[in-house]
Image (cartoon, rainbow, N blue to C red):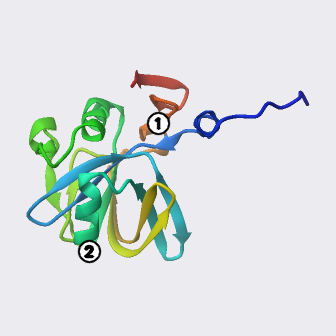
Amino acid sequence: MEAKIELSSADAIKTFPAFPAVLVAMGDGEKNVITIGLVQIFSFNPLILGIGVAPSRHSFKLLQKYPDFSINIPGKELVEQVLYCGTKSGRDTDKFKETGLTAIPGRKIKSPVIKECLVNFECKKSKTIEMGDRTWFLGEVVHTEAAKDYAREKGLLYWAGEFRMPGEVVRRR
């Protein structure tokens, strides 16, 4: 094995394999959607998913306020909407209206799910954990729906400033 080099935190992040890029929707009445790259499975049984959100984000306040949220897996055809929802604030913009994404009622939560996404996880907030510059919102999955033709390889990934599909760069940031 070759000698190793020391990396800064900014460069160390780039060594991780790709993360899923998801759209998280929350709110009952005042709806919002945010792009999240920090998403993780925290438990398999029960299924608990977590999202890391910076306190400066408008969605942070909504996630604190509401008891549930949805995690929605987009395909590559939604890359422009994913980028938009990650760069614009819901404080100033109706991201559903601006992107053409369709917020539909969840089956078991009050927050919406996103019709155009390949998979919709409906989560009831179970815990928040403050960790460094992010707060993790953990949610127990209470309902999941997926497109009939869904395959894991169709979900959009994010890695070191690039939206990707396995083996393919879809768009650079």
What type is the residue that disc 1 sits on? Tyr
Residue at the location (15% across, 43% down)?
A: 95
Label 1 SS: strand
* Residue 121 in the figure: left or right of residue 162: left
| Image quadrant in which you'd find residue 30 | bottom left
The residue nearer to you, when weighing 35 against 128, is: 128
Q: In the figure, 112 relative to 46: above or below?
A: above
Instruction: Give neighbour class at mark 2: few <14, some 14-19, many 20+ (Cα, 10 Å).
Output: some
Q: CA distance from mark 2 to mark 1?
A: 27 Å
What type is the residue that disc 2 sits on? Pro
* Residue 60 in the figure: left or right of residue 31: right
Task: Count every numbered label the image shows and give the total.
Answer: 2
Residue matched to label 2: 67
Residue matched to label 1: 158
Label 2 SS: loop
Residue at the location (48% across, 71% down)?
A: 47
Dot 2 or dot 1: first in sequence order is 2
The residue nearer to you, when weighing 65 against 44, is: 65
Q: In the figure, 128 relative to 24: above or below?
A: below
| Image quadrant in which you'd find residue 5 | top right
* Residue 152 in the figure: left or right of residue 99: right
Residue 44's spot in the image, x, y percent? 54, 70
| Image quadrant in which you'd find residue 96 | top left
Quadrant where the image shows the N terminus: top right
Residue 147's spot in the image, x, y percent? 32, 49
* Residue 101 in the figure: left or right of residue 171: left
Residue ranking furthest to the right: 1
Residue at the location (55% across, 26% down)?
A: 167
